[in-house]
């Protein structure tokens, strides 16, 4: 289920553009997303100032207040690893001398989370890697083969496993992203451009951002930071002032100038998101998520001019073919309108169902609708109150399992 980026009220499905489709080879460590209708790009990176750590209620064992950046680096940089993956991709060229495959190397970062050899990183760092082709290098330059034990494309996270025997593993303490505040100091440690264990500092610039996972689905509650993050940092830790990991560095905003370097806007997947799926990753299980199959638009004051029958809810913009929403009879409209003062690419589809309640709870935004759906499991039945052509009705939807990739038309 795709929902709108945090700064906007409109649901926008951002198409994934693979580098190979642009006529060039796949650059090692870089994949590019192009937002439909926009001139800027957001680059998924294979790869921040220290003060009070805030009111984080996480256990403070093995962490201290008032650490300097140097303290944190000395203590935890040995737990940050350099990840290399040999990526094999299928090509569509029948005359390819390499038998329809193309090989490249992806590099990024990761960090040790326990003494048994578990290492957290980004899924796009190892996506497409062949068995036995993923290696991790530690601070002492020791390099070992890592096994990919679990991955979740929808959050762009993956878990690697190394044999701990003979390794001096330095696990990083995991904090909580729930208690992070704008202005809190941050530190990123990673391997930008192959420069191993580089430290950069900054602050939390914003919260509750939304980015696109490589499979097209939205990752919510993302932390924005101005700590310098570049290709190679991806999968590395974003750390608070007490040395706790609060996020996994994943993407950067490039500003649309064609550069793949840092412009002061980086995004980290919240560590709480990783914690929610960690058991599944450790057990090699596919993370199961409930799926409705609509895009929707928050009804608020910006839509007053449309004279809708209600002043709250989620206006259905599209319904995925074959989705639980379609099977339950939910309908999208077919009349496109443009809001005054908005660009020509910012259109609203009118005439569709308005979802006003889910299991008796009032819907005030598209994000809330997504959160309520996410709180269920595939197969759960939910009752939705909808407004259709000014008439109120209730439909029961049997939620499905989220597909591997978001269908965009």
Image (tube, rainbow, N blue to C red):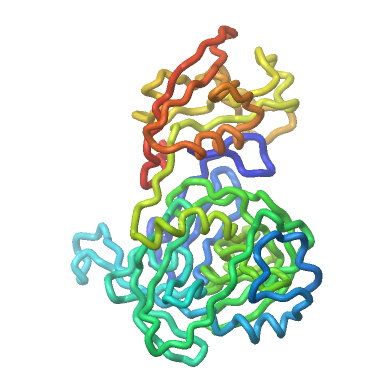
Q: How many marks?
A: 0
* Residue 313 visible to the viewer: yes
In this picture, residue 375 sits left or right of residue 328: right
| Residue nearer the viewer, 83 or 246 | 246
Q: Please determine whether, in this image, residue 290 is positioned above or below residue 79.
A: above
| Residue nearer the viewer, 58 or 11 | 58
Percent coordinates x, y for residue 360 in the rendering: 58, 21
* Residue 109 visible to the viewer: no
| Residue nearer the viewer, 11 or 60 | 60
Residue depicted at 36% across the width and 80% down the height:
163
In this picture, residue 96 sits left or right of residue 357: left
Percent coordinates x, y for residue 231 in the rendering: 54, 71
Residue depicted at 43% across the width and 87% down the height:
167
Residue depicted at 74% across the width and 31% down the height:
341
In this picture, residue 45 sits left or right of residue 134: right
Q: Quadrant of residue 264?
A: bottom right
Q: Please determine whether, in this image, residue 260 is positioned above or below residue 301.
A: below
Q: Quadrant of the C terminus?
A: top left
Percent coordinates x, y for residue 215 in the rendering: 43, 51
Percent coordinates x, y for residue 62 in the rendering: 64, 76
Please identify the residue farthest to the top as the structure is shown: 391
Residue depicted at 39% across the width and 27% down the height:
398
């Amino acid at each position: 289920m795709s929902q709108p980026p945090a700064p906007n009220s409109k649901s926008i499905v951002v198409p994934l553009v693979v580098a190979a489709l642009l006529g060039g080879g796949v650059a090692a460590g870089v994949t590019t997303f192009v937002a439909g209708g926009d001139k800027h790009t957001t680059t998924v990176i294979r790869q921040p100032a220290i003060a009070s750590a805030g009111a984080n209620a996480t256990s403070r064992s093995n962490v201290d207040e008032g650490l300097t950046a140097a303290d944190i680096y000395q203590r935890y940089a040995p737990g940050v690893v350099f990840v290399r993956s040999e990526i094999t991709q299928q090509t569509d060229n029948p005359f390819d001398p390499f038998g329809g495959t193309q090989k490249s190397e992806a590099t990024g970062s990761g960090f040790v989370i326990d003494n048994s050899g578990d290492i957290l990183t980004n899924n796009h760092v190892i996506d497409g890697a062949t068995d036995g082709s993923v290696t991790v290098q530690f601070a002492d330059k020791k390099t070992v083969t890592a096994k990919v034990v679990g991955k979740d494309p929808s959050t762009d996270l993956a878990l690697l496993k190394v044999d701990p025997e003979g390794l001096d593993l330095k696990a990083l303490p995991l904090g909580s992203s729930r208690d992070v505040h704008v202005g809190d100091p941050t530190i990123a440690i990673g391997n930008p451009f192959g420069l191993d264990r580089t430290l950069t500092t900054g602050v939390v610039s914003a919260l509750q951002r939304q980015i696109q996972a490589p499979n097209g689905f939205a990752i919510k509650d993302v932390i924005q930071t101005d700590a310098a993050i570049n290709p190679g940092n991806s999968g590395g830790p974003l750390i608070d002032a007490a040395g706790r990991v609060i996020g996994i560095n994943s993407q950067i905003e490039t500003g649309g100038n064609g550069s793949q370097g840092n412009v002061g806007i980086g995004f980290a997947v919240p560590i709480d998101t990783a914690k929610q799926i960690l058991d599944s990753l450790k057990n090699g299980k596919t993370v199961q998520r409930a799926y409705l199959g609509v895009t929707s638009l928050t009804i608020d004051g910006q839509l007053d001019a449309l004279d809708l029958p209600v002043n709250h809810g989620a206006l259905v913009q599209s319904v995925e073919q074959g989705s639980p929403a379609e099977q339950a009879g939910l309908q999208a409209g077919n009349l496109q309108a443009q809001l005054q003062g908005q660009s020509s690419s910012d259109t609203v589809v009118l005439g569709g169902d308005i979802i006003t309640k889910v299991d008796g709870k009032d819907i005030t935004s598209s994000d809330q609708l997504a959160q309520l759906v996410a709180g269920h499991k595939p197969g759960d039945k939910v009752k939705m109150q909808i407004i259709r052509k000014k008439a109120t009705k209730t439909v029961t939807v049997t939620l499905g399992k989220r597909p591997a990739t978001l269908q965009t038309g």
